Each structure stands twice: as C-alpha cells, then as structure tokens.
Image: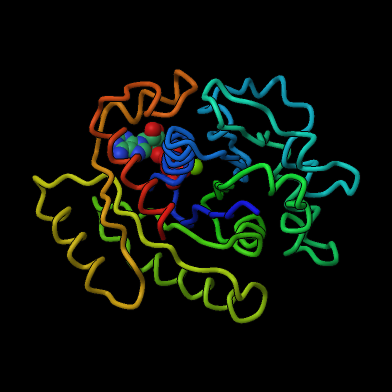
Amino acid sequence: MGRIIAIANQKGGVGKTTCAINLGGALAQLGERVLCIDLDPQGNLSVGLGIDLNSVERGMAQVIVEPDVSLASVIRETKTPRLDVAPTTIDLSAAEMELMTAIGREMALRDKVTPDVADRYSHIVIDCPPTLGLLTLNALVAADGVIIPVQTQYYSLKGVAALLKIIKTVQARLNPRLQVLGLLPTFYDSRTILGRDMLDSLKETGDHPVFRTVIRQSVKIGEAPTAGVPITTYDARSEAAKSFLELAKEVAHA
Ligand SMILES: Nc1ncnc2c1ncn2[C@@H]1O[C@H](COP(=O)(O)OP(=O)(O)O)[C@@H](O)[C@H]1O
Ligand SMILES: [Mg+2]
C-alpha cells in the first residue's frame, strides 16, 4: 500500500500547496507512482497540476460526503508521467459543513482510501487547507506521515506548536500510525538575519525532526503553477527543482 503523507499547517501562504505539487512531481520523476489529493476547497493544487476547475463535476467534495462516490472515480492523470491528481472545487467547503454532523466524521477520507487505490501508488500526498478544521483532521487520520512547511520569513513557531499538539491528540486517540516526518523550512532567504534565526530555532526547539532540505525563496516556484506542472517539469535545472528532488529522496528514505 502507498504511503500517505499529509502536508499541513493552519497558516496560509507557508508553501503547503507548493510542497504537495512539487514533492509529488519530484517523487514521480524518481520513478515513484504518486497521487496528489486536493483537500483545500480553494483548489490551488488542482489548478497547479493543470486541472480546469470548471471541468470537475465530481471531486473530493463528493468523495468525502457521498457514500457512492469512490476516490478512484475522481482521479485524473496530469501532464507529468506517474503523477495523478484527485481534484477539488469550492464545493468541498460545503461538504466540510455537511460532514460536521456525520457519524465517523473524522474517518471519512480514511475510509475512501481503499486498497484498490492505495495499491496503485507508492505515495499519496494530501494538500490540507489553512485551518485546523475537519478537513485537516481527516487528512491526519488518513495519513502515515505529516510534513509541516514553516515560513522562515516571520516568526511562526507558535502556530507550529499548536499543530504539533493536535497531532499528538490524533496519535493518541485516532491514528497511532501517524508520524511527524519533519518540519520543512520554506521561503528561506539566507541574506536575512530573521531567515537564519528561524532556521536555527526550528532546529533547536526540540523533539520534532527538521528536513535537511530547505526550500529557498524563488521566482520560478511561483511561476510553475501557471503552467500546470511541477517545478521539476517547468524548469528541471533550477535550484528549486533540485531542492524538491532532495526532499523527495529524504521523504522516500524517512
Ligand atoms: N519558495 C517559494 N518562493 C517563492 N514563492 C513561493 C515559494 N513557495 C510558495 N510560493 C508562492 O507563495 C504563494 C503561497 O504558497 P502556497 O504553496 O500556495 O501556500 P499555502 O498552500 O500554504 O497557502 C503561492 O503563490 C506560491 O506560488
Ligand atoms: Mg494551499
């Protein structure tokens, strides 16, 4: 069965979607078979992997709340070989509300990742919304591992502590399999003191692993989604592409 990895942080704009798309792309480039699941109603991951949201009649919203809609039925191929996507539309926002009153509401996603889908992939990467709501909780319950992107351009460790606390609760009560694979420093700029300080304090604060790979601030990273492909396809020689390949190797061995 494929390993399921959630990309989570309740803060927006820290590089979650960028990480999900480009880790997915890099793993695919290394020969892995990858599924990216878009669990953010904004649909940025879907668009960044070339999906026209107007063409999505059934997506993760329906998978989460409709018993008869399977995960397999919404999966599409992307332009990148070995990289598939389960897209979403804004309907996922209403679906999350609907889920609130459902029995087993934290298990909705886990129950849909059935062996027929999981066996097709070596890695399943879930992009979470910028909240600590039911969608993120569903991702953490379905996952084997979680990656936490952390912006190194402002002091953001308090939010990370809150997330780590929730992860501990999920581990204790709902999903003992869940492992923190690591904090991932993003938007790194070695020229700023804050950037260097943040990287140091990330590594010092203790009992959670930090990836060796650091994702630097890069214009190319912002451009790639407009082409609907990961950075490893958009500009294979860029430093950003190399960083995500390094990250993919770390993840594959973690
Ligand atoms: N390392 C980076 N350098 C420059 N721009 C980035 C970088 N990572 C992400 N971005 C851009 O910043 C914005 C927010 O990133 P995103 O991955 O969507 O964050 P999140 O999913 O956490 O909200 C996007 O426009 C993205 O293209
Ligand atoms: Mg996002």
- 233 displayed left or right of 206: right
The number of discs equals 0
- 198 displayed left or right of 13: left
Q: Could you say which is closer to the camera, residue 249 or residue 23?
A: 249
Relative to 203, does residue 126 appear above or below in the rendering? above
- 27 displayed left or right of 131: left
Q: Quadrant of the N terminus?
A: bottom right
Relative to 227, does residue 250 appear above or below in the rendering? below
Residue 176 in the image: x percent, y percent?
61, 76
Residue 32 in the image: x percent, y percent?
51, 40
Residue 161 in the image: x percent, y percent?
40, 71
Q: Quadrant of residue 158?
A: bottom left
Q: Quadrant of residue 19?
A: top left
Q: Quadrant of residue 253?
A: bottom left
Relative to 144, does residue 252 appear above or below in the rendering? above
Q: How is the image coloured?
A: rainbow
Residue 169 in the image: x percent, y percent?
57, 78
Residue sitting at x 48%, y 75%: 165
Residue sitting at x 49%, y 39%: 24
Q: Residue furthest front?
A: 31
Q: Quadrant of the C terminus?
A: bottom left
Residue sitting at x 36%, y 60%: 183
